[in-house]
Amino acid sequence: MSYRSLVLATAIACGALTLTPLSAKEALDIEAMESALRSQDQEAVLKALKTIRKSKEPKAAPLLDSLLNRGGSAPVLKAALKAAGKLGQRSSTHAVGPYARHRMPEIRRAAVQALIRTGGPEAVQILQLALRSNDGRVRGIAATGLGSLAAHESIDDLMTAFDHGVAEAAAAIGQLCLPEECEDFAERVGQAHFDVMTGGFDQILFRPTKEMPDAQKLRIIGRVRELGTSEAAAFLGDVLERWPSDWSKKVKQALQSATKATGGS
């Protein structure tokens, strides 16, 4: 630690130096942040983490990584993970990853949420493992994160997670599936709760045609139509109401016909 850093750390610990949120034009003092994060004063550390989080300064990511590698109290770790997620630097994934298996639920959840922002292949692998966590909220966050990260390689894991009750996996599957995989998902109609399935169907139907051909969208609409329930009618009517005016006329006509056939308006 340099002489200036030592002076800063002493001042922070003694309360002679306070950290205030930066204005939009102020640059983050990396050396001051490093000193604050090494302080034994938890309040000073938390203030520094808040300042870093609000600054969104990528150069501060290594400071967060060092803190996470050292460890700390639950409030400090949670704040550090939140800041790492806000900065969203892939280099932080390695430091964040182990906390996805932390003994404290709030730390596990903060870590999984941060990994969605830091991203990269390592984050995807950790999120895949998190789909099998004993913590239901971790499983749900992980499923949502894999969809957000466009991790198509996770489709089989997401299908398995969905079959084991991870409702959030439905939307992720809808975001990622290829037509034949979407059809595999759709075959679960009648086995899984329809209101859970709609999370995936909605994603499939509103994907651009270059990603999801009209033929597959028509098959989805046909499957929902065959249910003939009020829930199916409500879903089809809602999709029809949101269907962009310049999108496929064929799909729109199918939605109109299916809505009427199921008793919708």
Image (cartoon, helix red, strand yellow):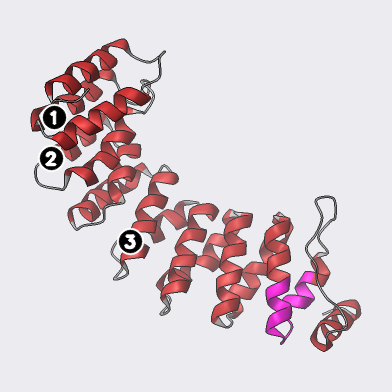
Q: Residues within 10 Å of mark 2 (few under 14, many from 20)?
A: some
Residue sitting at the far front:
265
Residue 176 image point, x, y percent: 34, 38
Query: Magenta part mainly helix, strand or loop?
Result: helix
**In this rendering, does residue 254 appear at all?**
yes
Q: Is residue 122 left or right of residue 58?
A: left
Q: What kind of element bears circle 3?
A: helix
Q: Which residue is mark 2?
A: 189
Q: Amino acid at mark 1?
A: Arg
Q: Which residues are magenta?
A: 33-47
Residue 223, which numbered label? 1
Residue 35 image point, x, y percent: 79, 77
Q: Amino acid at mark 2?
A: Val
Q: Is residue 235 above or below residue 52?
A: above
Q: What kind of element bears circle 2?
A: loop
From the image, state whether disc 3 or disc 1 is nearer to you. 1
Report, in whole angstroms, how far the alpha carbon at label 2 lies from the one at label 1. 8 Å
In magenta segment, residue 44: yes
Q: Amino acid at mark 3?
A: Arg
Q: Quadrant of the N terminus?
A: bottom right
Q: Residues within 10 Å of mark 1 (few under 14, many from 20)?
A: some
Q: Residues within 10 Å of mark 3 (few under 14, many from 20)?
A: many
Q: Is residue 45 above or below residue 23?
A: below
Report, in whole angstroms, how far the alpha carbon at label 2 lies from the one at label 3. 22 Å
Q: Are marks 2 and 1 in contact (CB under 8 Å)?
A: yes
